[in-house]
Image: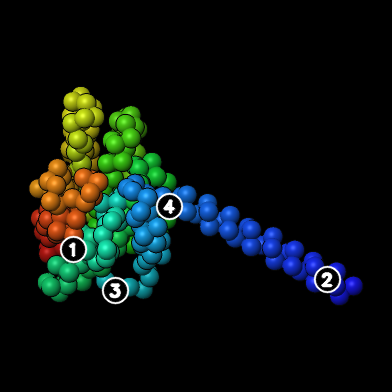
Amino acid sequence: MPQNKHLHLNSAASHTAKIIKFCYFILAVLLMGCGNEKSSEKTKEQNSDREDTTVVSENSKTKTILCFGDSITAGYGLDDSNEAYPALLQKKIDSMELNYTVINSGLSGETTAGGRSRLSWVMKQKVDVFLLELGGNDGLRGIPLTETRANLKAIIETVQTQSPGTRIILAGMELPPNMGKDYTTEFRELFAEIASQYDVAFIPFILKDVGGIKALNQNDGIHPTAEGHQIVANTVWEVLRPMISE
């Protein structure tokens, strides 16, 4: 009888280990971002860390700025997440001794549909400024613009409904010309149209003075280098600073 019990325990332990390995596999698939395979593991670890810090304690006395986006916000490919533009915004805020905490809720590979589905989780906390930076992956994948437009609108409407006092910033994006003139033009214009419709603050192109400049982008030509993120931070700061300095 003791021997059978020992075999049973070993079998159960083996079964449990298989389940755990399968769960890790599923998690890895869900967190796959865009970019090359060499950097994917680092990206998933960075995103995992950010997901853990997305929700701030309700007892926090500081106001919250939530950067809700994709790999641009996540800081994909950077050696240090402190080089990404949300962390650089925090440094600017700290230098002015303003009572705000910047939360990086960027997820590499995120689409507007993905952002819409995880919005309820990040909005469990009180958010004072909501920076919406999504849509780039929709465009690169050729997702119908009607879907992108509907998802962005739904995200903004959800934030406005759940947290009427939250100020929203919509960050626009542009696509490379190889996606076709009609598609790229309509894609660029939909951000301005949505910002106007919902009367939210607007950044026409978050990669202004960075997009298409080889020296400021990584080898994939899409994700900014550390130097590129400094410029992105300055672009966002132009719109954010007046909001939080009032």
Badge 2 density bin: few <14, some 14–19, many ≥20, Cα 10 Å = few
The nearer-to-camera label among 1 and 2 is: 2
Q: Are marks 1 and 3 in contact (CB under 8 Å)?
A: no
Q: Is residue 239 left or right of residue 8?
A: left
Q: Secondary structure at mark 4?
A: loop
Q: Which residue is mark 4?
A: 31
Of marks 1 and 2, which one's residue comes earlier in the chain? 2
Do the residues under discs 4 and 2 have CB atoms within 8 angstroms?
Answer: no
Which percent across, then down, holds residue 75? 27, 57
The CA distance from mark 4 to mark 2 is 39 Å
Give the quarter of the image for residue 145.
top left
Q: Earlier in the sequence, mark 1 or mark 3?
A: 3
Q: Residue at x 32, y 48 (%)?
A: 35
Q: Which residue is mark 3?
A: 61
Q: Earlier in the sequence, mark 4 or mark 3?
A: 4
User: Quick one: 206 or 27, which is closer to the camera?
Assistant: 27
- Residue linked to disc 1: 89
Residue 12: x, y in percent?
73, 64
Q: Earlier in the sequence, mark 4 or mark 2?
A: 2
Where 108 sits versus 15, above or below? above
